[in-house]
Amino acid sequence: MSNTYLYLLIALLAGAMMPTQAATNSKMSIFVGSPILAAFLSFLVGTLALFAYALLSGETLASLAEARNAPPIAWIGGFLGAFFVASAVILVPRIGVAMTFSLFIAGQMIVTLIIDHFGLLGVPVKEVSLARLGGILLITAGVVLIRRF
């Protein structure tokens, strides 16, 4: 299997884990009585898992000190992840997994077009095309179909 196929498989598995994570975090919120605490526990477990992986894979933790040189925008990722996870925990029991993730994907696609078109955050510019806009319309149509049925 070439690296490209491996990367595609990893992306597919990561995508499959997102709604599963939302459902399991929603289950946790029932036990702890709070979607925010459930999201916090999710990040705590994830942090511990990443720390263990870093140690086992031989990462040099000394390079963490270089984070102090990162620009402020580089620090927002944790906030964005926390918002995403907390939102999923709150939304899944209210509108369902399919609707929650349909809207998440629609939002992701809209923002990816904007980021690509303007080359924001240092990514290469890839201008919006009719075909890409058509993709957004198809995703939007999918959200409508999921909502109606």
Image: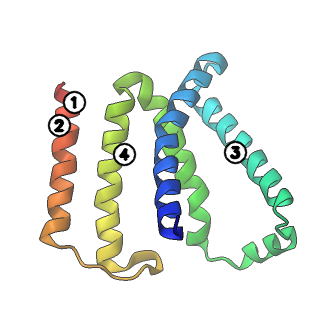
Residue ID at (57%, 54%): 79
The image position of residue 80, as x and y in percent, is: 52, 54
Badge 1 marks a residue whose secondary structure is helix
Residue at 34% in and 64% down = 112
Q: Badge 4 local density, few (<14 within 10 Å), some, or many (20+)?
A: some
Which numbered circle lies on residue 46?
3
SS at circle 3 = helix
Residue under label 1: 147
Residue 34: x and y in percent read: 60, 24
Residue contact at pointers 1 and 2, CB within 8 angstroms: yes
Q: CA distance from mark 4 to mark 3?
A: 21 Å
Residue 86 to residue 94: above or below: below
The numbered mark, 4 or 1, whose residue comes first in the sequence reads 4
Task: Residue 41: give x, y in percent of width and height.
Answer: 69, 35
- The kind of residue tagged 4 is Phe
Which residue is denoted by mark 2 in the rendering? 144
Q: Residues within 10 Å of mark 1 (few under 14, many from 20)?
A: few
Q: Identify which residue, 131 or 84, lies in the foreground.
A: 131
Q: Which quadrant of the figure has residue 37?
A: top right
Q: Which residue is mark 4?
A: 104
Q: Earlier in the sequence, mark 4 or mark 2?
A: 4
Amino acid type for the residue under numbered disc 2? Val
Label 3 CA crowd tier, 10 Å (few <14, some 14–19, many 20+): few
Q: CA distance from mark 4 to mark 1?
A: 14 Å
